[in-house]
Image: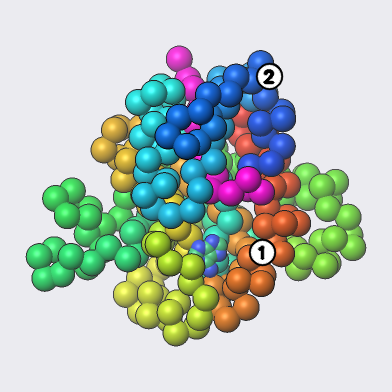
Amino acid sequence: KLRLGVISALVEEQEGLVEAMKGPQKLSHGMRDYTVGSLWGIDAVCVLSRIGKAAAAMTAAILVEKFEVTHIVFTGVAGSGDICVNVGDIVVAESLVQHDMDARPLFPRFEVPLTGLSHFPSDLTLSERVVGSAQDFLADDLKSVFSVAEAKEFGLDGPRVHRGLIGSGDQFIHSRTQLGQLKEALPELLAVEMEGAAVAQVCFELGIPYAVIRTISDNANEEAAVDFMRFVQTVASRYAFHVVKRLCQR
Ligand code: ADE
């Protein structure tokens, strides 16, 4: 029986979902609140991981082991990792890399020691459903969810959905040099965030299908902190809510 785990780092990335749950039951464990209930007919568990790889790994493991979820979707914001990816666009992970993992010279850069992997592939079926939900959201819902003035103010100018590599690290990327150095080592990088690849490793090791969907909040440059704060407070939750809604309705 399908049971979907929905993780976000911050409350703004998941606002509205818990309220939309039918028959919600709150359970606190390991300093997090897990809400079990039904989302548009899908048995689901919503939780906030907080920021960073360890927090995300802990949350994903508890979702599987204690709450017995069968699938995990991580939804949140990310910095752009490529000039083709704009603020307001959506990136769905094809694979994820822990960009701050570096056990050289014992193991190649980015490889998670003794797993033999640097790039963790997301579940294709689930990710394609997420892509479809994101495309439908941008095509059909955006106009009703944001006024013309809001879309202009937030820079939502014909946003698009991308599939590709997401990098996660315990670093908020906020300079062109920082991002440039990452891009040199990982040229195919589309987005940078701080949790996805940790969830990916946990799900890989436990055999749980997962997807990571990120809305671009900033360009991971010197303006990133200001752009991130503003985007999270104004746009993030509306994206997350409607994409998860469409996903559950699929
Ligand atoms: N999440 C959103 N923007 C980010 C950035 N620039 N770096 C890391 N994580 C992020």
Q: Position of residue 226 (x, y in %)?
A: 66, 72
Q: Earlier in the sequence, mark 1 or mark 2?
A: 2
- What residue appears at the point 49 percent right and 43 percent down from the top-left corner? 49
Q: Quadrant of residue 166?
A: bottom left
- What residue appears at the point 17 percent right and 55 percent down from the top-left corner? 113
- The residue identified by callout 2 is 22
Q: Residues within 10 Å of mark 1 (few under 14, many from 20)?
A: few
Q: Is residue 128 visible?
A: no
Q: Which residues, given as a range, are shown in magenta?
A: 1-13
Q: Position of residue 12 (x, y in %)?
A: 66, 49
Q: Amino acid at mark 2?
A: Lys
Kindly indicate whether the residue at mark 2 contacts the one at mark 1 (C-beta within 8 angstroms): no
Seen from the viewer's position, the closer of residues 30 and 214 is: 30
Q: Is residue 3 visible?
A: yes
Above or below — where is 66 with respect to 234?
Answer: above
Q: Position of residue 5 (x, y in %)?
A: 49, 31
Residue 138 among those drawn in magenta: no
Q: Amino acid at mark 1?
A: Met
User: Total of numbered circles in the picture?
Assistant: 2
Seen from the viewer's position, the closer of residues 45 and 71 is: 45
Q: Closer to the camera: disc 1 or disc 2?
A: 1
Query: How far apart are the two marked residues, 1 and 2, measured between alpha carbons?
Result: 30 Å
Residue 3 among those drawn in magenta: yes
- The residue identified by callout 1 is 229
- What residue appears at the point 51 percent right and 28 percent down from the top-left corner? 28
Q: Quadrant of residue 65?
A: top left
Seen from the viewer's position, the closer of residues 79 and 233 is: 233
The dot on residue 240 is none
